[in-house]
Amino acid sequence: MSSALPKLTNTIHIRDFVDSVLADPTRPETANYVEIHTDVNVFQEDGFYGSDITVEPIHTRIRAYLTQSERELYVTNAFFYADGRFSTAVAKDDRLEITVQALSLQRCDTLEICPISSYPSYTALIF
């Protein structure tokens, strides 16, 4: 019997600020599943960027399980780090959208938790 899981898994790492936190619409019966919304910025990379490329923020939905006390940490403009499996789709307005199933999610209040010194910008990091 073959597996329904893909052989390769896409993984994304994001450091950004919370725009909003909503109930996960794919799990309406479970209050602790949430969807964190943010607009991720993609930054110039040496040898991977050209003046003919238009880069706009990508709307991102990060789905995670949070207890009530954890959910209170993820308020508008809170800085966070998340990683997990992701998929992309074109939204109704013809813009790219990323959906992440978070494997790890952290609220970042200090640089010791989410170090940024080795990255050109702390707004978003995508691998």
Image (cartoon, rainbow, N blue to C red):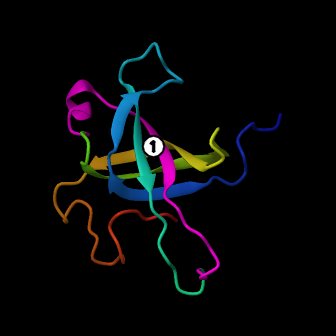
Q: Residues within 10 Å of mark 1 (few under 14, many from 20)?
A: many
The residue located at (54%, 24%) in the rendering is 26
Q: Name the residue beneath numbered marker 1.
A: 102
Whole-percent x, y for residue 29 in the image: 46, 12
Seen from the viewer's position, the closer of residues 108 and 19 is 19
Q: Quadrant of the N terminus?
A: top right
Q: Within the magenta stretch, is there residue 43?
A: no
Give percent across and percent down for residue 24.
Answer: 45, 27
On the image, the x and y values in percent for residue 38 come to 41, 47
Give the residue displayed 27% in from the left and 77% down from the top.
Answer: 117
Q: Is residue 71 magenta?
A: yes
Label 1 SS:
strand
- Residue 13 in the figure: left or right of residue 49: left
Residue lying at the far top in this picture: please name it.
29
Q: Which image quadrant for residue 66?
A: top left
Residue 30: horizontal and vertical position, in percent? Answer: 42, 17
Question: Residues in magenta?
Answer: 49-74
> Could you tell me which residue is drawn at 63 percent across and 48 percent down?
88
